[in-house]
Amino acid sequence: MNAASTDTKDLSHEARNLRWLLSNFVEEVPGVHSVAVVSSDGLLLITSDAEAEAAGEPGGQQPPAGPADARADLATVVSGLASLTDGAARLMDGGSVRQTAVAMDEGSLFVMSISDGSLLGVHASADCDMSVVGYHMALFVGRAGHVLTPALRNELRRSREAAGSVSGGGR
């Protein structure tokens, strides 16, 4: 048994459930490569392939066409994009940003706010159905938003730090 599976057993029910929801999101929604929850201060809390990263597999189930460390940088991109769109909304008196979608030639990026100030980021293929991804993001936010308490966010941060030290690195 590896350290990643031991760490998973040590997580609270809420943390295990959140990890399951993220993994299920990737498995169930066509075209989705990875999903990440990012704290309001820009730190990666949990990703859909946290167990693969904790086991020392760089990038886990990285889509073949994507950059090698796309998932590791997803938190940074999600945080930056959210900040940019929030600033644009303030300048335009547009109110709160509910969702941001970026369609690129070779992929798509979605960002949605979670009630506690955290962010949900999704990296998907260019040919994904954007409305289906948006719908599933809203479902995830509805299911998981209320459990992202300060205690759970701290637990997720500690878990990522511990996994990083076990695998010899990490972000």
Image (tube, rainbow, N blue to C red):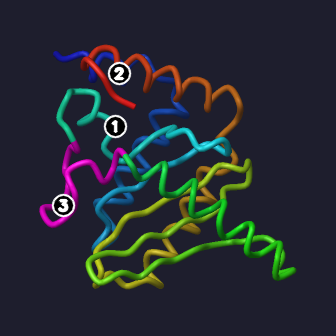
- Label 1 belongs to which residue? 50
Residue stretch rendered in magenta on the structure: 59-72
Residue 76: x percent and y percent?
Answer: 49, 49
* Comes first in the chain, label 1 or label 3: 1
Tell me what residue is drawn at x 58 percent, y 68 percent: 138
Q: Secondary structure at mark 2?
A: helix
Q: Secondary structure at mark 1?
A: helix
Say which residue appears at 22% left-offset and 57% top-offset: 67
Indicate whether residue 70 is drawn in magenta: yes
CB of mark 1 within 8 Å of CB of mark 3? no
CA distance separating discs 2 and 3: 22 Å
Badge 1 crowding class, 10 Å Cα cut-off, few under 14, some 14 to 19, many 20 or more, is many
Give the dominant element type of the magenta stretch: helix, strand or loop. Answer: loop
> Can you identify the residue that label 3 sits on?
63
Relative depth, front residue between 137 and 105: 105
Where residue 130 sits, quadrant-wise, is bottom left
Q: Is residue 18 magenta?
A: no
Residue 166: % across, % down = 29, 14
Q: Residue at x 35, y 21 (%)?
A: 163
Residue 130 relative to residue 81: left or right: left
